[in-house]
Amino acid sequence: MSLLWGPSFLFVKVAGAVYFITQEEPVVLWDFVNEILARLDVPPVKRQVSLPLARALGGLLEWSFRAFNLAGEPRLTRFLASELALDHYYDISRARRDFGFAPQVTMEEGLERTVAYFKKAFRN
């Protein structure tokens, strides 16, 4: 098969592939959340519940919303409990290789922008 550079080449090379687009810097979730809270002069998260308890509560809320035909979504679901219990890091090497992707904003700059947004959007 002869491949030409350009849109047709890119399509053949990446058709059906999955890519993670992130800032590439690993983040410890609750340290990151507490850093945002500190910069907003909000006390840090100190209390926690076990993952099994959080998933059980999420399941109960999901059931309640279905059983009582409540509008919207529960504030806690089993999925959300699981996601909040883990740190995530995704490898962007394929996006870097196939698209030349490079993060444009560092974690620190993104954090500064986020805090500035919250301070502006939620002034008391």
Image (cartoon, grey):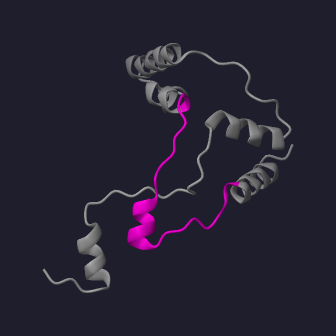
| Residue 115: image location, x then y, percent | 77, 50
Tell me which secondary structure the magenta stretch mostly adopts.
Answer: loop
Judged from this view, the residue extending furthest toward the left is 1
The number of numbered badges drawn on the structure is 0
| Residue 14: image location, x then y, percent | 29, 67
| Residue 28: image location, x then y, percent | 62, 38
Q: Is residue 15 left or right of residue 111?
A: left
Q: Is residue 92 left or right of residue 8?
A: right
Quadrant of the rendering where the C terminus is positioned: top right
Q: Residue at x 81, y 49 (%)?
A: 119
> Is residue 101 part of the magenta span, yes or no?
yes
Q: Is residue 74 left or right of residue 67?
A: right
| Residue 13: image location, x then y, percent | 26, 71
Tell me which segment is drawn in magenta: 84-107
Q: Is residue 78 above or below residue 50?
A: below
Q: Nearer the viewer, residue 7 or 60?
A: 7
Q: Residue at x 42, y 64 (%)?
A: 95
Q: Residue at x 55, y 31 (%)?
A: 84
Q: Residue at x 48, y 28 (%)?
A: 82
Q: Nearer the viewer, residue 82 or 57?
A: 82
> Is residue 93 part of the magenta span, yes or no?
yes
Quadrant of the rendering where the N terminus is positioned: bottom left
Q: Is residue 78 above or below residue 111?
A: above
